[in-house]
Amino acid sequence: MIEKIIAALLPIVITLMLGFLAAWHHDFDAKQGSTLNRMVMLYALPLTLFAGMMGLSRSVLLEQANMAIIILIGMVVGYVLVYLISYYIFHKSQKNAALLALAISGPAVPFVGVPVLGHLFGDLSTIPIAVCSMQYSHESIPGAYNDIYTFIWQYRWF
């Protein structure tokens, strides 16, 4: 089992080390790094997930519906719990509670999901990665922005 974990995480560690060395040697500046990150998140990751999902049959996708529902419920419940605990128990402001909930409940699946889950679970890994990515970008982030906007609007009159 430890060999499988190391084999899944080693490419990430090596990639991070190469990025660190490139930055240390000034091979990239901040603008180029931002452009590269944007290209990966806007084009490479969605196309990889799309290709993975298209490679699966409809029956395999439908078999994974329960897992998708569990992931969605887990992420939404996690966001709501952290938000409520931060706001009511720790007396954080609405915007701080929303950002804290977003940071804690939003997993980094889009960033590390493909190399790690892909190595561990093969083609079926595209389903949880896609579900987590969609939930995070379509529900968690807008929910946090809505909470922050409500906070700003509420105190705008003072």
Image (cartoon, rainbow, N blue to C red):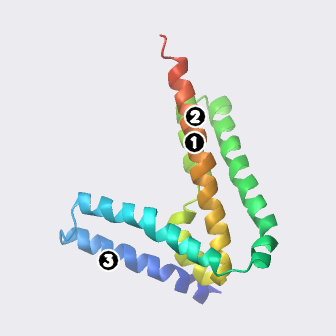
Question: At x 57% / y 29%, what residue is drawn?
Answer: 94
Residue 46 seen in the figure: yes
Residue 93 seen in the figure: no
**Residue receiving disc 3:** 18
Residue lying at the far top of the rendered structure: 158
Q: Residues within 10 Å of mark 3 (few under 14, many from 20)?
A: few
**Label tally:** 3
Q: Is residue 63 left or right of residue 81?
A: right
Where disc 3 sits, the SS reads helix
Q: Quadrant of residue 142?
A: top right
User: In the rendered structure, are the residues bearing label 3 and label 1 in contact, judged by CB atoms less than 8 Å apart?
Assistant: no
**Where residue 109 sits in the image (x, y, percent)?**
57, 64
Amino acid type assigned to the residue bearing label 2 in the image? Asn
Label at residue 146: 2
Question: Label 3 vs label 2: CA separation?
Answer: 38 Å
Amino acid type assigned to the residue bearing label 3 in the image? Leu
Q: Is residue 158 left or right of residue 147?
A: left
For this rendering, which residue is in front, 100 or 74? 74
Amino acid type assigned to the residue bearing label 1 in the image? Pro
Q: Is residue 73 left or right of residue 112?
A: right
Question: Label 1 vs label 2: CA separation?
Answer: 6 Å
Which one is closest to the eye, mark 3 or mark 1? Answer: 1
Question: Label 3 vs label 1: CA separation?
Answer: 34 Å
Label at residue 65: none
Question: At x 64% / y 74%, what residue is drawn?
Answer: 53
**Residue receiving disc 1:** 142
Q: Earlier in the sequence, mark 3 or mark 1?
A: 3
Q: Residues within 10 Å of mark 2 (few under 14, many from 20)?
A: some
Which one is closest to the eye, mark 3 or mark 2? Answer: 2
Where disc 2 sits, the SS reads helix
